[in-house]
C-alpha cells in the first residue's frame, strides 16, 4: 500500500502510475538511460518520455509551449470564461428593456449553455480524428459570427440567435485545452498549468461579470457585443499564427503514464542507440527522424487524419467514459462544483436588484469581485503547491507517483465549499451587507477552484490517452447542469429563498469531497479494472502509433 493507495494484484503496472523520482526509487540502473528533467528536476524521470522527433510537442522549447497555452487561455477566457456569464450582471435591466420577465432573459443564456453541451460530442469526435487545431479555430469563428448577430440589433430574437451561435464556441475551450496540457507537458509540470486554466475558466468569469456590467451600464447593450468582437478577432489571429497542432502520434512505449507495460529498459536502449548514432560522424541528420517543421508548415489548419475509424464511432466516446468509475467521479465532481458556482452567480441579479440592496447592473457586477478574488486565491494555492505536493508524495512513496495523490486537495475544497455555501446562503437570506455576501461567495470559490483542480488533474493523470473524451463529457455534463439551473434557480429562490438552494449546494459539495476518500484508497484498482476492460481498446477507438515505428 502506497500512502493509503491500495495496490493492485491484477497488473504488474497500472496505467497512470509512473516512476517519477529515480533517486527515491533507487532505480538509477534502469532509468539512467531515460530522459530526465533539468536543473532541480534532474532526478525526475520524464513521463511520458519524449520521442526523438523534433515535432513531438513534448520536445518543443518551453517558451513555445507557454505561448501556445497563453493564447489558448485567452481563447478560453473569451469563448468560455466570458461567453457563459456575458450577461449575468445585466439580466434585470435587459428584461426591463425587452419588457419581459427575468427568467425569460436568463433562459437565453441557458440556450447558450445547451448549445455548448450539444456540440460537445462533435468536438470530441473531430478532435480525435482530425486534431485539435481546426476545432479551436472553427470554435472561435462560431463566437465571432454569434457576436456579429448580437451587435446588429436590440431584439429578443437577435439576442437568442446570438447566444445560441456563441454557445457552439464554448466546448472546445472548456475541454480540449486541458487535454492540450497533456499533449505538451510532463506529469510533474501539469499542475501549475491546470491551475491557471482552472482559474481562467471559472474565476475569470467573475471578473467578466464585473467588466460586462460596467460596459452595459456605461455604453449600453450593443457596445457590449462590439467590444467583445474586437477581442475575439485578435485572439483568432494569434491562435492561427502561433498555435500549431499539438496532437501527436508516438509509439506506445513512450507513453509511460498510460501503458500497461512501461518497457523502461526498451526505452533506455533506444535512447542510448540514438545518442550513439547522433555522436557518430555523418549521423547528425538521420533519415528516420523527421525534419523540424517550419513556421509556415505549422500554420496548416489540416495536418492529417489521426484515426481512420468511422467518425460516428467517436461521437460515443465521451459517453463511454461514464462507464469508467474513476473517470466518472472526476467528471461528476468537477461538473457539480462548477455548476454550483454558476448557480450562485445566476441568482445574484434577481436578489441584489431587490430590497434591501436595490442594485443596478454596475453594482451587481462589482459583487463579482468576491468570487474573482476567491478564485485567484484558490488558483494560487493549487498553482504553488500542487506540483510540489506530488513530488513530495512521490518521494515518500519510494519514487512512485499515483494520480490519486491529486485528490488530497479535496480536503480543503470540502471545508471551503461547505463554509462558503452555507454562510453565503444565510447572509443572502437575512439581507446582510453586500461586502460580506461577496466575501463568503469568495470563500466558496476557493473551495470550488481547488476541488475542480483536484478532480480534473486526477482525470488527466489517470487517463491521459482518453482526456479528450473525459473533458468533453465534463463540459457536456456541467453545461446541461447550467441549463437546468438557468431554468429553475431563480424560481427556486423566489419560492423558498436563497438559503435553501445554497444549503443544497453546500451539502452535495461536502458529500463529493468525502467521496474522494474511497476513490483515493481504491483508485488504483479502479484504474487497473478499466485497463483490463477498456472499451476504447475493445472498440478500437485509440489513436496510438504502431509499435513497428521504433527500432
Image: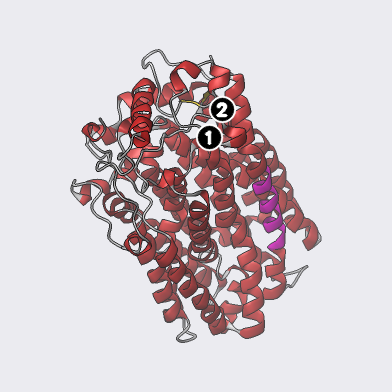
Nearest the eye: 443 or 228: 228
Could you say where residue 341 lies in the image, as x and y percent from the top left?
A: 60, 53
* Residue segment shown in magenta: 368-381
Whether 331 is drawn above or below 230: the answer is above
Magenta region, main secondary structure: helix
Relative to 86, is 211 on the left or the right?
Answer: right
- For the C terminus, the image quarter is top left
**Dot 2 and dot 1 residues touching (CB under 8 Å):** yes
Relative to 518, is 421 on the left or the right?
Answer: right
Specify the quadrant of the image occupied by residue 97. Answer: bottom right
Whether 293 is drawn above or below 220: the answer is above
Specify the quadrant of the image occupied by residue 465. Answer: top left
Q: Residue at x 50, y 36 (%)?
A: 187
In the picture of the structure, the residue carrying the numbered disc 2 is 43
In the picture of the structure, the residue carrying the numbered disc 1 is 37
User: Quick check: is 376 in the magenta stretch?
Assistant: yes
Amino acid at each position: 500500500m502506497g500512502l493509503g493507495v491500495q495496490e493492485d494484484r491484477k497488473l504488474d503496472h497500472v496505467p497512470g502510475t509512473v516512476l517519477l523520482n529515480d533517486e527515491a526509487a533507487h532505480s538509477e540502473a534502469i532509468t539512467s538511460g531515460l530522459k530526465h528533467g533539468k536543473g532541480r528536476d534532474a532526478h525526475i524521470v520524464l513521463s511520458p518520455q519524449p520521442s526523438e522527433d523534433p515535432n513531438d510537442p513534448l520536445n518543443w522549447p518551453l517558451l513555445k509551449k507557454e505561448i501556445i497555452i497563453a493564447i489558448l487561455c485567452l481563447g478560453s477566457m473569451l469563448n468560455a470564461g466570458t461567453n457563459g456569464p456575458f450577461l449575468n450582471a445585466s439580466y434585470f435591466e435587459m428584461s426591463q428593456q425587452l419588457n419581459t420577465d427575468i427568467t425569460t432573459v436568463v433562459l437565453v443564456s441557458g440556450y447558450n449553455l445547451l448549445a455548448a453541451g450539444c456540440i460537445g460530442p462533435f468536438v470530441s469526435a473531430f478532435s480525435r480524428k482530425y486534431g485539435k487545431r481546426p476545432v479551436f479555430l472553427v470554435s472561435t469563428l462560431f463566437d465571432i459570427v454569434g457576436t456579429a448577430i448580437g451587435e446588429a440589433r436590440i431584439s429578443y430574437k437577435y439576442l437568442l440567435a446570438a447566444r445560441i451561435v456563441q454557445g457552439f464556441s464554448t466546448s472546445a475551450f472548456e475541454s480540449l485545452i486541458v487535454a492540450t496540457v497533456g499533449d505538451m507537458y510532463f506529469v510533474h509540470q501539469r499542475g501549475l498549468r491546470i491551475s491557471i486554466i482552472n482559474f481562467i475558466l471559472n474565476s475569470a468569469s467573475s471578473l467578466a461579470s464585473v467588466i460586462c456590467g460596467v460596459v452595459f451600464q456605461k455604453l449600453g447593450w450593443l457596445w457590449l457585443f462590439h467590444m467583445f468582437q474586437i477581442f475575439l478577432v485578435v485572439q483568432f489571429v494569434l491562435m492561427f499564427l502561433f498555435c500549431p497542432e499539438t496532437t501527436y502520434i508516438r509509439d506506445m512505449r513512450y507513453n509511460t503514464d498510460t501503458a500497461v507495460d512501461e518497457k523502461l529498459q526498451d526505452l533506455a536502449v533506444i535512447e542510448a542507440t540514438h545518442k550513439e548514432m547522433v555522436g557518430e560522424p555523418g549521423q547528425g541528420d538521420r533519415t528516420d527522424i523527421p525534419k523540424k517543421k517550419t513556421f509556415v508548415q505549422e500554420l496548416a489548419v489540416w495536418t492529417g487524419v489521426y484515426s481512420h475509424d468511422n467518425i460516428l464511432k467517436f461521437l460515443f466516446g465521451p459517453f463511454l467514459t461514464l462507464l469508467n468509475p474513476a473517470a466518472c467521479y472526476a467528471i461528476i465532481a468537477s461538473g457539480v462544483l462548477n455548476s454550483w458556482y454558476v448557480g450562485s452567480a445566476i441568482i445574484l441579479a434577481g436578489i441584489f436588484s431587490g430590497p434591501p440592496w436595490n442594485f443596478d447592473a454596475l453594482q451587481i457586477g462589482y459583487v463579482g469581485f468576491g468570487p474573482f478574488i476567491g478564485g485567484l486565491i484558490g488558483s494560487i494555492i493549487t498553482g504553488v503547491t500542487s506540483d510540489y505536493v506530488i513530488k513530495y508524495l512521490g518521494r515518500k512513496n519510494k519514487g512512485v507517483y499515483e494520480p490519486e495523490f491529486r485528490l488530497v486537495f479535496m480536503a480543503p475544497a470540502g471545508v471551503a465549499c461547505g463554509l462558503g455555501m452555507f454562510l453565503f446562503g444565510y447572509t443572502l437570506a437575512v439581507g446582510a451587507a453586500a461586502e460580506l455576501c461577496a466575501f463568503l461567495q469568495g470563500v466558496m470559490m476557493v473551495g470550488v477552484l481547488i476541488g475542480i483542480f483536484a478532480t480534473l488533474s486526477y482525470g488527466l493523470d489517470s487517463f491521459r490517452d482518453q482526456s479528450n473524451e473525459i473533458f468533453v463529457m465534463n463540459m457536456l455534463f456541467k453545461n446541461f447542469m447550467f441549463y437546468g439551473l438557468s431554468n429553475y434557480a431563480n424560481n427556486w429562490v423566489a419560492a423558498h429563498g436563497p438559503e435553501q438552494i445554497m444549503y443544497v449546494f453546500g451539502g452535495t459539495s461536502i458529500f463529493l469531497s468525502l467521496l474522494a476518500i474511497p476513490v483515493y484508497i481504491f483508485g488504483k484498482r479502479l484504474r487497473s479494472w478499466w485497463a483490463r476492460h477498456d472499451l476504447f481498446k475493445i472498440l478500437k477507438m485509440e489513436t496510438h502509433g504502431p509499435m513497428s515505428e521504433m527500432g
